[in-house]
Protein backbone atom coordinates (compact mmCIF):
# COMPACT_ATOMS: atom_id res chain seq x y z
CA UNK A 1 0.00 0.00 0.00
CA UNK A 2 1.42 3.40 -0.87
CA UNK A 3 0.32 6.86 0.04
CA UNK A 4 1.28 10.08 -1.62
CA UNK A 5 0.48 13.38 0.03
CA UNK A 6 0.02 16.04 -2.58
CA UNK A 7 0.05 19.48 -1.12
CA UNK A 8 -1.52 22.28 -3.10
CA UNK A 9 0.44 25.47 -2.69
CA UNK A 10 -1.08 28.01 -0.31
CA UNK A 11 1.04 30.93 -1.35
CA UNK A 12 1.78 32.98 -4.39
CA UNK A 13 4.48 30.63 -5.59
CA UNK A 14 4.37 29.57 -9.17
CA UNK A 15 4.15 25.89 -9.87
CA UNK A 16 7.39 26.11 -11.80
CA UNK A 17 9.16 26.32 -8.45
CA UNK A 18 7.39 23.23 -7.04
CA UNK A 19 7.20 21.08 -10.20
CA UNK A 20 5.02 18.34 -8.67
CA UNK A 21 2.32 18.45 -11.35
CA UNK A 22 3.61 18.60 -14.91
CA UNK A 23 1.79 18.84 -18.21
CA UNK A 24 3.14 16.02 -20.39
CA UNK A 25 0.93 16.05 -23.50
CA UNK A 26 -2.23 17.76 -24.74
CA UNK A 27 -4.39 16.91 -27.70
CA UNK A 28 -7.12 19.28 -28.85
CA UNK A 29 -8.85 17.83 -31.88
CA UNK A 30 -8.94 20.11 -34.90
CA UNK A 31 -10.78 17.43 -36.84
CA UNK A 32 -12.68 14.36 -35.78
CA UNK A 33 -10.62 11.40 -34.63
CA UNK A 34 -11.41 7.75 -34.04
CA UNK A 35 -9.14 7.68 -31.00
CA UNK A 36 -6.59 9.60 -28.98
CA UNK A 37 -3.40 8.01 -27.73
CA UNK A 38 -0.83 9.17 -25.24
CA UNK A 39 2.33 7.23 -25.99
CA UNK A 40 5.91 7.15 -24.76
CA UNK A 41 4.74 8.13 -21.29
CA UNK A 42 7.82 8.70 -19.13
CA UNK A 43 8.20 6.50 -16.08
CA UNK A 44 9.64 9.08 -13.72
CA UNK A 45 6.36 10.26 -12.20
CA UNK A 46 4.33 8.57 -9.48
CA UNK A 47 0.82 9.03 -10.85
CA UNK A 48 -0.84 10.30 -13.98
CA UNK A 49 -3.92 12.43 -14.38
CA UNK A 50 -5.87 12.82 -17.58
CA UNK A 51 -8.26 15.75 -17.88
CA UNK A 52 -10.60 15.72 -20.84
CA UNK A 53 -13.74 17.16 -22.36
CA UNK A 54 -15.31 15.01 -25.06
CA UNK A 55 -18.14 14.91 -27.59
CA UNK A 56 -18.88 12.51 -30.41
CA UNK A 57 -19.04 13.37 -34.09
CA UNK A 58 -22.22 11.60 -35.21
CA UNK A 59 -25.31 13.82 -35.54
CA UNK A 60 -27.50 10.76 -35.87
CA UNK A 61 -26.96 9.69 -32.28
CA UNK A 62 -27.35 11.23 -28.85
CA UNK A 63 -24.77 9.31 -26.87
CA UNK A 64 -21.59 7.31 -27.20
CA UNK A 65 -19.39 5.27 -24.87
CA UNK A 66 -15.81 6.08 -23.90
CA UNK A 67 -13.40 3.21 -23.53
CA UNK A 68 -9.80 3.14 -22.39
CA UNK A 69 -6.93 0.74 -22.97
CA UNK A 70 -3.42 0.53 -21.64
CA UNK A 71 -0.22 -0.28 -23.53
CA UNK A 72 -2.18 -1.44 -26.55
CA UNK A 73 -3.56 -4.36 -24.56
CA UNK A 74 -6.72 -5.64 -26.23
CA UNK A 75 -7.01 -8.77 -24.12
CA UNK A 76 -9.56 -9.36 -21.38
CA UNK A 77 -7.28 -7.88 -18.74
CA UNK A 78 -9.47 -5.11 -17.39
CA UNK A 79 -12.02 -4.85 -14.62
CA UNK A 80 -14.03 -1.82 -13.54
CA UNK A 81 -16.86 -0.70 -11.30
CA UNK A 82 -19.16 2.24 -11.75
CA UNK A 83 -21.30 4.18 -9.31
CA UNK A 84 -23.50 6.72 -11.00
CA UNK A 85 -26.56 8.86 -10.60
CA UNK A 86 -28.78 9.31 -13.61
CA UNK A 87 -31.07 11.95 -12.22
CA UNK A 88 -33.59 9.57 -10.75
CA UNK A 89 -31.65 6.80 -9.04
CA UNK A 90 -28.16 5.61 -8.15
CA UNK A 91 -26.78 2.50 -9.84
CA UNK A 92 -23.67 0.43 -9.34
CA UNK A 93 -22.23 -1.98 -11.87
CA UNK A 94 -19.18 -4.23 -11.95
CA UNK A 95 -17.36 -5.81 -14.86
CA UNK A 96 -14.43 -8.22 -14.99
CA UNK A 97 -12.40 -9.78 -17.76
CA UNK A 98 -13.16 -6.92 -20.10
CA UNK A 99 -11.08 -5.77 -23.06
CA UNK A 100 -11.37 -2.10 -22.04
CA UNK A 101 -12.04 0.16 -19.08
CA UNK A 102 -14.93 2.38 -18.00
CA UNK A 103 -17.50 2.46 -20.86
CA UNK A 104 -18.66 5.95 -19.82
CA UNK A 105 -21.57 7.51 -21.72
CA UNK A 106 -21.03 10.97 -23.22
CA UNK A 107 -22.81 13.18 -25.79
CA UNK A 108 -22.78 12.43 -29.48
CA UNK A 109 -23.31 15.26 -31.96
CA UNK A 110 -27.03 14.66 -31.96
CA UNK A 111 -27.18 15.86 -28.36
CA UNK A 112 -27.65 19.45 -27.21
CA UNK A 113 -25.25 21.69 -29.11
CA UNK A 114 -21.96 22.67 -27.48
CA UNK A 115 -22.33 20.10 -24.73
CA UNK A 116 -19.16 18.17 -23.91
CA UNK A 117 -18.62 15.75 -21.03
CA UNK A 118 -15.87 16.41 -18.47
CA UNK A 119 -13.59 13.65 -17.29
CA UNK A 120 -10.85 13.52 -14.66
CA UNK A 121 -9.02 10.20 -14.67
CA UNK A 122 -6.26 9.26 -12.23
CA UNK A 123 -3.83 6.43 -12.94
CA UNK A 124 -2.16 5.47 -9.71
CA UNK A 125 1.36 4.06 -9.37
CA UNK A 126 1.35 3.69 -13.13
CA UNK A 127 5.08 2.94 -13.47
CA UNK A 128 5.23 0.36 -10.73
CA UNK A 129 6.16 -3.15 -11.85
CA UNK A 130 5.15 -4.90 -8.64
CA UNK A 131 1.45 -4.15 -8.77
CA UNK A 132 -1.43 -4.16 -11.19
CA UNK A 133 -2.42 -0.64 -12.26
CA UNK A 134 -5.45 1.01 -10.68
CA UNK A 135 -7.57 3.84 -12.02
CA UNK A 136 -10.21 6.16 -10.65
CA UNK A 137 -12.39 8.46 -12.67
CA UNK A 138 -14.95 11.19 -12.06
CA UNK A 139 -17.06 12.16 -15.04
CA UNK A 140 -20.41 13.65 -15.84
CA UNK A 141 -22.85 14.83 -18.44
CA UNK A 142 -26.43 15.79 -19.21
CA UNK A 143 -27.28 13.79 -22.32
CA UNK A 144 -31.05 13.71 -22.27
CA UNK A 145 -32.16 10.36 -20.93
CA UNK A 146 -28.58 9.47 -20.06
CA UNK A 147 -27.66 12.01 -17.43
CA UNK A 148 -24.63 11.04 -15.42
CA UNK A 149 -22.69 11.98 -12.34
CA UNK A 150 -20.34 9.03 -12.30
CA UNK A 151 -17.48 7.58 -10.29
CA UNK A 152 -15.42 4.71 -11.65
CA UNK A 153 -12.69 2.47 -10.35
CA UNK A 154 -10.64 0.38 -12.72
CA UNK A 155 -7.95 -2.26 -12.80
CA UNK A 156 -5.52 -3.30 -15.48
CA UNK A 157 -4.55 -6.81 -14.47
CA UNK A 158 -0.92 -6.45 -15.53
CA UNK A 159 2.18 -5.37 -13.62
CA UNK A 160 3.86 -3.70 -16.57
CA UNK A 161 4.55 0.00 -16.34
CA UNK A 162 1.99 2.01 -18.25
CA UNK A 163 3.61 3.66 -21.24
CA UNK A 164 0.58 4.40 -23.38
CA UNK A 165 -3.10 5.17 -22.90
CA UNK A 166 -5.70 4.87 -25.63
CA UNK A 167 -9.05 6.65 -25.47
CA UNK A 168 -11.64 5.60 -28.01
CA UNK A 169 -15.40 5.54 -28.50
CA UNK A 170 -17.27 2.27 -28.71
CA UNK A 171 -18.39 3.51 -32.12
CA UNK A 172 -17.75 6.56 -34.27
CA UNK A 173 -15.30 9.36 -33.58
CA UNK A 174 -14.53 12.16 -31.20
CA UNK A 175 -15.65 15.58 -32.41
CA UNK A 176 -13.45 18.55 -33.19
CA UNK A 177 -12.83 20.48 -29.99
CA UNK A 178 -12.57 17.40 -27.82
CA UNK A 179 -9.56 17.74 -25.56
CA UNK A 180 -7.33 15.33 -23.71
CA UNK A 181 -4.50 16.48 -21.43
CA UNK A 182 -2.01 14.22 -19.68
CA UNK A 183 -0.30 15.32 -16.47
CA UNK A 184 2.42 13.66 -14.43
CA UNK A 185 2.33 13.87 -10.64
CA UNK A 186 5.58 13.44 -8.80
CA UNK A 187 5.93 11.44 -5.63
CA UNK B 1 10.32 19.04 -21.58
CA UNK B 2 7.37 18.85 -19.16
CA UNK B 3 5.58 22.06 -18.36
CA UNK B 4 5.07 22.75 -14.66
CA UNK B 5 1.51 23.70 -13.96
CA UNK B 6 -1.10 24.13 -11.24
CA UNK B 7 -0.88 27.76 -10.26
CA UNK B 8 -2.57 29.43 -7.31
CA UNK B 9 -4.45 32.32 -8.91
CA UNK B 10 -6.17 33.79 -5.86
CA UNK B 11 -7.12 32.93 -2.31
CA UNK B 12 -9.37 34.33 0.38
CA UNK B 13 -9.75 33.35 4.01
CA UNK B 14 -12.56 35.32 5.58
CA UNK B 15 -11.66 37.24 8.72
CA UNK B 16 -15.21 38.52 8.95
CA UNK B 17 -18.45 37.30 7.43
CA UNK B 18 -19.26 38.26 3.87
CA UNK B 19 -22.39 38.27 1.77
CA UNK B 20 -20.53 36.55 -1.07
CA UNK B 21 -17.14 35.75 -2.52
CA UNK B 22 -16.18 36.76 -6.04
CA UNK B 23 -13.22 35.81 -8.18
CA UNK B 24 -13.16 38.27 -11.05
CA UNK B 25 -10.98 39.11 -14.03
CA UNK B 26 -9.95 35.47 -14.23
CA UNK B 27 -7.18 35.05 -16.77
CA UNK B 28 -8.04 33.01 -19.84
CA UNK B 29 -4.51 31.68 -20.10
CA UNK B 30 -5.20 28.42 -18.27
CA UNK B 31 -7.05 25.37 -19.52
CA UNK B 32 -8.91 24.39 -16.37
CA UNK B 33 -9.71 25.95 -13.03
CA UNK B 34 -9.94 24.22 -9.67
CA UNK B 35 -11.73 25.95 -6.81
CA UNK B 36 -11.27 24.51 -3.31
CA UNK B 37 -13.78 26.02 -0.90
CA UNK B 38 -14.69 25.45 2.72
CA UNK B 39 -17.77 27.43 3.65
CA UNK B 40 -19.64 28.04 6.88
CA UNK B 41 -23.14 29.44 7.06
CA UNK B 42 -24.07 32.24 9.44
CA UNK B 43 -26.93 30.61 11.43
CA UNK B 44 -26.40 27.80 13.97
CA UNK B 45 -28.29 24.59 13.22
CA UNK B 46 -29.85 26.04 10.09
CA UNK B 47 -28.67 24.62 6.76
CA UNK B 48 -27.86 27.39 4.32
CA UNK B 49 -27.27 26.29 0.77
CA UNK B 50 -24.07 27.51 -0.82
CA UNK B 51 -24.47 28.48 -4.45
CA UNK B 52 -22.41 29.19 -7.54
CA UNK B 53 -22.82 31.58 -10.42
CA UNK B 54 -20.44 32.47 -13.20
CA UNK B 55 -20.12 35.66 -15.21
CA UNK B 56 -23.00 37.18 -13.23
CA UNK B 57 -25.44 34.99 -15.11
CA UNK B 58 -28.71 34.90 -13.17
CA UNK B 59 -30.59 33.02 -15.90
CA UNK B 60 -31.73 29.41 -15.60
CA UNK B 61 -28.61 28.23 -17.36
CA UNK B 62 -27.17 25.86 -14.78
CA UNK B 63 -28.07 22.23 -15.40
CA UNK B 64 -26.89 19.55 -13.05
CA UNK B 65 -27.12 15.88 -12.28
CA UNK B 66 -26.21 14.86 -8.77
CA UNK B 67 -25.44 11.73 -6.82
CA UNK B 68 -25.70 11.95 -3.05
CA UNK B 69 -25.28 9.71 -0.06
CA UNK B 70 -26.65 10.97 3.23
CA UNK B 71 -25.74 8.09 5.46
CA UNK B 72 -28.91 6.12 4.93
CA UNK B 73 -29.60 6.20 1.23
CA UNK B 74 -28.14 7.16 -2.14
CA UNK B 75 -30.16 9.45 -4.37
CA UNK B 76 -29.83 11.23 -7.67
CA UNK B 77 -31.55 14.28 -9.08
CA UNK B 78 -31.41 16.70 -11.99
CA UNK B 79 -32.12 20.39 -12.03
CA UNK B 80 -31.96 23.38 -14.34
CA UNK B 81 -32.00 26.57 -12.32
CA UNK B 82 -30.32 29.94 -11.98
CA UNK B 83 -27.35 28.76 -9.93
CA UNK B 84 -25.20 25.75 -9.15
CA UNK B 85 -25.95 24.08 -5.84
CA UNK B 86 -22.85 23.24 -3.81
CA UNK B 87 -24.37 21.92 -0.59
CA UNK B 88 -25.41 23.15 2.82
CA UNK B 89 -23.58 24.43 5.87
CA UNK B 90 -24.15 26.10 9.21
CA UNK B 91 -21.84 27.93 11.60
CA UNK B 92 -19.92 24.86 12.78
CA UNK B 93 -20.52 22.32 10.02
CA UNK B 94 -18.95 23.58 6.81
CA UNK B 95 -19.44 22.34 3.28
CA UNK B 96 -16.15 21.23 1.73
CA UNK B 97 -16.18 21.58 -2.04
CA UNK B 98 -13.79 20.97 -4.89
CA UNK B 99 -15.03 22.38 -8.18
CA UNK B 100 -13.31 21.55 -11.45
CA UNK B 101 -14.04 23.93 -14.32
CA UNK B 102 -12.77 22.19 -17.45
CA UNK B 103 -12.10 24.20 -20.63
CA UNK B 104 -13.47 27.23 -18.79
CA UNK B 105 -12.26 29.71 -21.40
CA UNK B 106 -13.21 27.72 -24.51
CA UNK B 107 -15.75 29.60 -26.63
CA UNK B 108 -16.94 26.55 -28.55
CA UNK B 109 -18.36 24.70 -25.57
CA UNK B 110 -20.84 24.99 -22.77
CA UNK B 111 -18.87 24.90 -19.53
CA UNK B 112 -18.72 21.58 -17.73
CA UNK B 113 -18.09 21.68 -13.98
CA UNK B 114 -17.42 18.67 -11.77
CA UNK B 115 -18.19 19.06 -8.07
CA UNK B 116 -17.23 16.88 -5.15
CA UNK B 117 -18.70 18.15 -1.90
CA UNK B 118 -18.81 16.73 1.58
CA UNK B 119 -20.40 17.69 4.83
CA UNK B 120 -19.57 14.90 7.23
CA UNK B 121 -21.77 16.09 10.09
CA UNK B 122 -25.54 16.19 10.02
CA UNK B 123 -27.21 19.51 10.61
CA UNK B 124 -30.01 18.72 13.02
CA UNK B 125 -33.36 18.56 11.34
CA UNK B 126 -31.95 18.59 7.83
CA UNK B 127 -31.52 15.57 5.59
CA UNK B 128 -29.22 17.34 3.22
CA UNK B 129 -25.86 16.76 1.60
CA UNK B 130 -23.51 14.18 3.11
CA UNK B 131 -21.27 13.10 0.24
CA UNK B 132 -22.09 14.57 -3.13
CA UNK B 133 -20.79 14.14 -6.67
CA UNK B 134 -22.34 16.47 -9.19
CA UNK B 135 -21.91 17.34 -12.84
CA UNK B 136 -22.96 20.89 -13.64
CA UNK B 137 -23.20 22.49 -17.08
CA UNK B 138 -23.29 26.22 -17.58
CA UNK B 139 -25.15 26.47 -20.86
CA UNK B 140 -23.14 29.30 -22.32
CA UNK B 141 -20.13 29.35 -24.64
CA UNK B 142 -18.64 32.52 -23.18
CA UNK B 143 -15.32 32.20 -21.41
CA UNK B 144 -15.70 32.22 -17.64
CA UNK B 145 -14.08 35.31 -16.18
CA UNK B 146 -16.00 35.62 -12.90
CA UNK B 147 -16.97 33.09 -10.25
CA UNK B 148 -19.43 34.04 -7.48
CA UNK B 149 -20.12 31.97 -4.37
CA UNK B 150 -22.98 33.03 -2.11
CA UNK B 151 -25.41 31.55 0.42
CA UNK B 152 -29.14 31.07 0.02
CA UNK B 153 -29.56 33.53 2.87
CA UNK B 154 -27.42 35.20 5.48
CA UNK B 155 -23.67 35.40 5.05
CA UNK B 156 -20.69 33.21 4.47
CA UNK B 157 -19.14 33.05 7.90
CA UNK B 158 -15.64 34.02 9.02
CA UNK B 159 -13.17 31.19 8.79
CA UNK B 160 -14.45 30.14 5.38
CA UNK B 161 -11.62 29.68 2.88
CA UNK B 162 -11.35 29.77 -0.88
CA UNK B 163 -8.48 28.85 -3.18
CA UNK B 164 -8.62 29.21 -6.97
CA UNK B 165 -6.05 27.36 -9.08
CA UNK B 166 -5.32 27.44 -12.77
CA UNK B 167 -4.11 24.36 -14.65
CA UNK B 168 -2.07 24.94 -17.76
CA UNK B 169 -2.54 22.90 -20.89
Image (tube, helix red, strand yellow):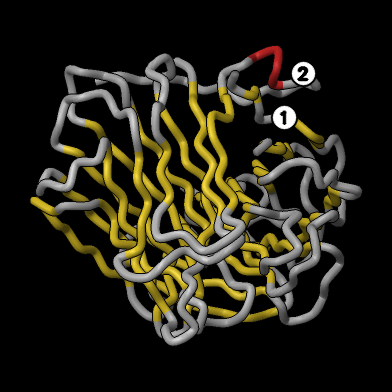
Residue at image x 79%, y 80%? B59
Report whether A55 appears left or right of A103. Answer: right
The quarter of the displayed image where residue A177 is located:
bottom right
CA separation in Å, label 2 and label 1: 8 Å
Q: In the rendered image, which quarter contains the N terminus of chain A?
A: top left
* Image coords of residue B32 (percent x, y): 66, 46
Which percent across, then down, holds residue B126?
Answer: 52, 67
- Give the structural element (helix, strand or loop) at label 1: strand
Question: Residue shown at 49%/26% (left/top)?
Answer: A184
Q: Is residue B18 left or right of residue B108?
A: right
Report helix, strand or loop for mark 2. Answer: loop
Are there few (<14), some (14-19), or many (20+) residues within 10 Å of tag 1? many
What residue is disc 2 on?
Answer: A13
Do marks 2 and 1 share a chain?
no
Residue B37 at least partly seen:
no
The mark found on residue B7 in the picture is: 1
Classify A176 as above or below A144: above
Amino acid sequence: MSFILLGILNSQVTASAAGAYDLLQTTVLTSSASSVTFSSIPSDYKHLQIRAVIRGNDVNYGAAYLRIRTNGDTSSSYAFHSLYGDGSSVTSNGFSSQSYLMNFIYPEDGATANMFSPIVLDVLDYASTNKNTTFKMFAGGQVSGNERSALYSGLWNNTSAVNSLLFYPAGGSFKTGSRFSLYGIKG
Amino acid sequence: MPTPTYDLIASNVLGTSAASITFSSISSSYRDLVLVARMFGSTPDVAREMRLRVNSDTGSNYSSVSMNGDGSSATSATSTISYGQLGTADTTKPILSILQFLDYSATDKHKPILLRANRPEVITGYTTTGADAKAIRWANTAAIDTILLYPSSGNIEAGSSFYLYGIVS
